[in-house]
Image (cartoon, rainbow, N blue to C red):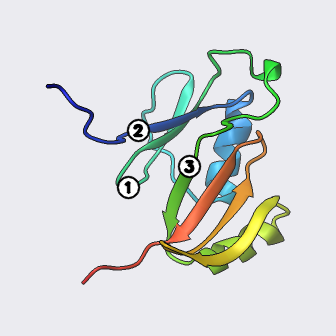
Amino acid sequence: MPRLIGPDFIGIQVADLDAAHTFYTKVVGLTAVPNGPPGAVVFDTKPIPFAVRAPVVDLDAVDILGHGIAIWFGCDDADALHDHLASRDVPIAFPPKDGPFGRYFAFQDPFGYTITAHTVQETA
């Protein structure tokens, strides 16, 4: 039987592609790939690419973007990233705490998405 293998791309729709590009590169610290498709910005994230794209639905017709969807990013230091984002006035959904995957916290991007970041534990 055919089966799903697992996630291999994450994309979110945003009303302002330029503002999303600026937020995710200048504030969050991601690097955009140089040759993304038209209407999208793809970031060099590992192991799964992440992108923002022009909307294909009316984003004003919903109250909460991505309701019921969890987007987690690994990072090298959740506490330091939290402090960096908080110092840039990025809304924090909840502060760093310990969880099953190590330290984690969540922030809201300027478009209404809640993004969780967790410290990736190095494996030997």
Tag 3 residue? 71
**Residue 51 image offset from top left, x and y in percent:** 52, 38
| Residue furthest to the top | 57
**Residue 116 image offset from top left, x and y in percent:** 61, 59
Label 3 element class: strand
Tag 2 residue? 9
**Residue 103 image offset from top left, x and y in percent:** 57, 77
Taking 78 as reference, is 73 above or below it? above
Number of the front mark, 2 or 3: 3
Tag shown at residue 59: none
Q: Quadrant of the N terminus?
A: top left
Tell me which amino acid carries mark 3. Ile
Q: CA distance from mark 1 to mark 2?
A: 10 Å
Q: Nearer the viewer, residue 80 or 25?
A: 80
Label 1 element class: loop
| Residue furthest to the right | 89
Tell me which amino acid carries mark 1. Lys
Q: Dot 2, crowdedness within 10 Å: few (<14), some or many (≥20)?
A: few
Q: CA distance from mark 3 to mark 1?
A: 14 Å
Contact check, label 2 and label 3, Cβ < 8 Å: no
Contact check, label 3 and label 1, Cβ < 8 Å: no
**Residue 17 image offset from top left, x and y in percent:** 67, 31
Name the residue: 63% across, 23% down. 54
Q: Earlier in the sequence, mark 2 or mark 3?
A: 2
Q: Earlier in the sequence, mark 1 or mark 2?
A: 2
Q: Earlier in the sequence, mark 3 or mark 1?
A: 1
Label 2 element class: loop
Tag shown at residue 46: 1
Contact check, label 1 and label 2, Cβ < 8 Å: no
| Residue furthest to the bottom | 124
Name the residue: 31% across, 42% down. 6
